[in-house]
Image (cartoon, rainbow, N blue to C red):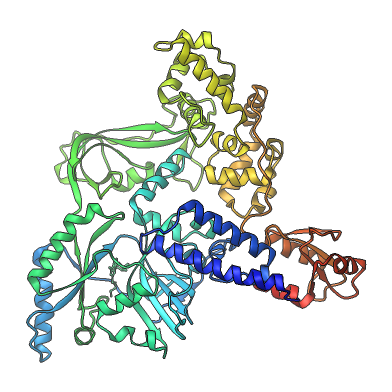
Amino acid sequence: MATNAKSKGALARIDQLVDELNDHSYRYYVLSQPSISDAEYDELFRELQNLEREHPEHVRPDSPTQRVGAKPLDGFATVKHRIPMLSLDNAMNEQELLDFDEQVRRFLEKDGGDPKEIEYTVEYKFDGVAVSLVYEDGRLSQAATRGDGTTGEDVTLNARTIKAIPLKLRSKELPKGLLEIRGEVLFRKKEFDALNEERQARGEETFANPRNAASGSLRQLDPQETARRPLWFFSYGVGAVESSSKSISNLARQPLAAAMAEVESLGFSISPGYRTVKGADALVTAYREAENSRDTLPFEVDGIVIKVNDVELQERLGFRQRSPRWAIAAKFKPVEAVTKLEDIIIQVGRTGALTPVAVLKPVRVGGVIVSRATLHNQDEIERKGLLIGDSVVVRRQGDVIPAVVAAVTASRTGAERSFSFPRECPECGSLAERPEGEAVTRCPNPQCPAKLHNRLVHYASRDAMDIEGLGDKMVELLLEHQLVKDLPDLYSLRVEQLQELPRMGEISSKNLVESIAASKERPLDKLVFALGIRHVGSKTAQTLARQSGTIEKFLSLTSDDLLAMEEVGPETAASVSEFLADRYSQRLVQALLEGGVTPAPVAVRAAAGGAFTGQSFVLTGTLSSMSRKEAEEQILSRGGKVSSSVSKKTSFVVAGESPGSKLDTAKKLGVSVLSEQEFSALLGSH
Ligand code: IVH
């Protein structure tokens, strides 16, 4: 393909934008010192996206646009670690920490030395998932989970979506050879809470703790799903180094703290407060300080990790079966309390999920009074063997939702009774259903009042139809007075009716009617989200709206249409199909439209995320390596369009053997022409 002046200009700008955006990400995710606003970042990102769309041949592998875009996998390949990923021994209290220091000194003494005070590094023990990141010639080439320590799973595509993981090392000259960085992928507390709230609102199971959430998110077969999870990464060490580059070949030979400073300068976050201390007393002080500061951290930690700083001493100390003698994890005390499990009640969510909730005798756990805790589902209660009346251990870590850890079986009196999960919905009496293979039991009745209440609140919420004045209390009032039996009834409410309600005056009634009316013209994505379809959060609703454009098109989406959408996973596709095929939902949407809801159409977008998004291709002549149909599919699967005639808007004409007049038109209009070889190369690089 001819590289003309325009293309060169674009290349320079693309280079500049990629570097600039990566730098901003580094400042945000690693240094925690953002240098531009999110809006400015988005603007630069869009400029880059547009340029890359016009010049797909210049898309760099470390471009921030290339973090997402990969197709779902059937399963993960296995990866054998170059050096096993070991575990750590635990010290559960100060005495055990002192014992560790003594053992280290005794071992070294026996070994012929006379160490008085050992220098240790101190860092937090992250509560996430261990990963190994392999960089070859400075670029991320493979990410793997720890697995059994010898063999893990290849999660490269997922790791690429994590912004705190550099795709390219930060170094003037990229170091040749191989460098393995080890660390932990984790959720921060506030994003974990938000994720669980969102899942609860969608009627999905919540995660018990940030570690499970991180592990589940990293092990998604669909990288687009991982990309939606705000994961972070902190490095705690260096694995294999196979390089003669000056900058990295010495990493494994330096004192640990110096190596970690290098790791930090290559673009990774390391533990906040990372430092070295000398001797047993300083170690204990550091342990106490870390425990006192744990709640100020944005993520969960369950202890600190102490490592001998000097690599020679490390070598002399060596390893036990599965853990090094030169390191230990000093665990913090979990924040726990024992209280009585007074009852188990069932809450019905918006999507009908029946969630068992523990009613606890109020107890203080780590500074917060806890009286309720989710028990997630039926299996969880059985797994823990909980009986009503049991004394139970309740644990809270940092900001995390309290959990019932276990029953104190020793204090049973015989008066405890078992809990039987109701067969019927406690709100409407419908027979509850538990689909095979699922943990959640649901109420199937679309008109169930519990669902209706929650559905109305959701429908009116800010990210949905944004109806001011229609919150939890108001919804309750409307239902209680039978002014509303389902969503569409909102649109026939009159001021006179509302005025009759307790505490409602003329003005507040008028205001409510007006804000309900104002919701009629919300854009399509808001309506799609407001409908409360399972698995459809506001992001997915945007995708669905952008792919359909109008409500009519949305309602006619087929299961195949949904499955073809890159950002929609099979679970979501199934749930949307089910919603669209359901007679009750059809009538509901119809009634909303008849009530005057006219969602503003949304600009249609081609399959998002693909490298050819926004590009149109025209094929002419015969291709030798693939059929016309295959070529079309390849283009479509990358988000591009295929048209039959050439115009000024055509991005590329692909010319095979004996091309027709389309080639002449392309030349006349100045449209780029790709030979079959060039086309194949373009496909190969995306
Ligand atoms: S060092 C040979 N440092 O703890 C030493 N591990 O029980 C290897 N972990 O699988 C680990 N924070 O996932 C180290 N600051 C830290 C850590 C840490 C969390 C995890 C890691 C490992 C497990 C070992």
669 left or right, relative to 81: right
- Residue 63 seen from this side: no
* Residue 610 quadrant: bottom right
Q: Tell me how many marks there are.
A: 0
Ligand 1 image position (quadrant): bottom left
603 or 236, nearer to the observer: 603
* Residue 584 quadrant: top right
517 left or right, relative to 284: right
* Residue 133 quadrant: bottom left
641 or 25, nearer to the observer: 25
Quadrant containing the N terminus is bottom right
Quadrant containing the C terminus is bottom right
94 or 394, nearer to the observer: 94
Task: Provide residue 538's location: percent of width, then percent of height.
Answer: 53, 42
Q: Is residue 39 above or below residue 373?
A: below
Task: Provide residue 369's location: percent of width, then percent of height.
Answer: 21, 37
82 or 386, nearer to the observer: 82
- Residue 392 seen from this side: yes
Task: Provide residue 82's location: percent of width, then percent of height.
Answer: 40, 81
Task: Provide residue 524's location: percent of width, then percent of height.
Answer: 62, 37
Q: Is residue 456 above or below residue 220?
A: above
Q: Is residue 439 above or below residue 341?
A: below
Q: What residue is drawn where x is 19% and y is 87%? A: 316
